[in-house]
Image: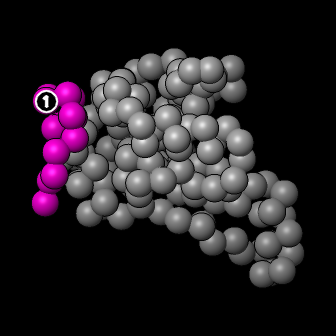
Amino acid sequence: MYPMRIAAQAALEQSDEILTRFWQQVDFNLFEDQCWLWRGRYHGNGSPVLYVAPRYIDAGLIAFFAVVGEIPPAGRVDHCCGDPRCVRPTHLQLTASPRSQTRLADLHDGYVLPIYIPTLAQERHAVLRALDLVTHGSWRAVS
């Protein structure tokens, strides 16, 4: 795992405040096919980021953490919807790095599968927890 991702994982596990700040920057849309747009800061390359001292963390990685419970150890977050501002978990997919994609495509006749795509059930559970977190200031058990 990359050192930045290790530090981000540790920070997210220790503080509900980071996830509260994350969800407060998301413009939710209840229609299943619509994007959830990021209202926070953007990196120079146009990707949404959240400041978690001492650095900025890709908002897509935080969305993955909120849904899956961990930051992916490797790979990159791609937007299935094509909108780099979107942080909706079901619109994100974890894929191999560009270099790895090239190697995998060579091995598999040009076809590369995504590594992971969050499910709608995982996303719905994360939304319930996010609403609870933002409303009550802490995560409670949600079944």
Q: Residue 37 location, x and y as percent?
A: 39, 31
Quarter of the image holding residue 86? top left
Q: Quadrant of the C terminus?
A: bottom left
Residue beneath the point at 47% across and 63% down: 117
Q: Nearer the viewer, residue 27 or 62?
A: 62
Q: Residue 56 location, x and y as percent?
A: 60, 25
Q: Which residue is mark 1?
A: 136
Q: Nearer the viewer, residue 64 or 143?
A: 143
Q: Amino acid at mark 1?
A: His
Note whether residue 75 is visible: no
From which residue to which does the magenta span run?
131-143
In the displayed image of the protein, which residue is found farthest to the bottom?
108
Q: Indicate left or right for 136 with 28 as reference.
A: left
Q: Indicate left or right for 33 with 118 as reference.
A: left
* In the depicted structure, whether residue 27 falls above or below residue 142: above
Q: Residue 5 location, x and y as percent?
A: 63, 43
Q: Nearer the viewer, residue 23 or 16?
A: 16
Residue beneath the point at 62% across and 20% down: 54
In the displayed image of the protein, which residue is found farthest to the front?
14
* In the depicted structure, whether residue 27 falls above or below residue 127: above
Residue 133: in magenta span: yes
Per the image, label 1 sits on a secondary structure element best described as helix
* In the depicted structure, whether residue 52 falls above or below residue 117: above
Q: Residue 125 location, x and y as percent?
A: 23, 55
Residue beneath the point at 80% across and 63% down: 100
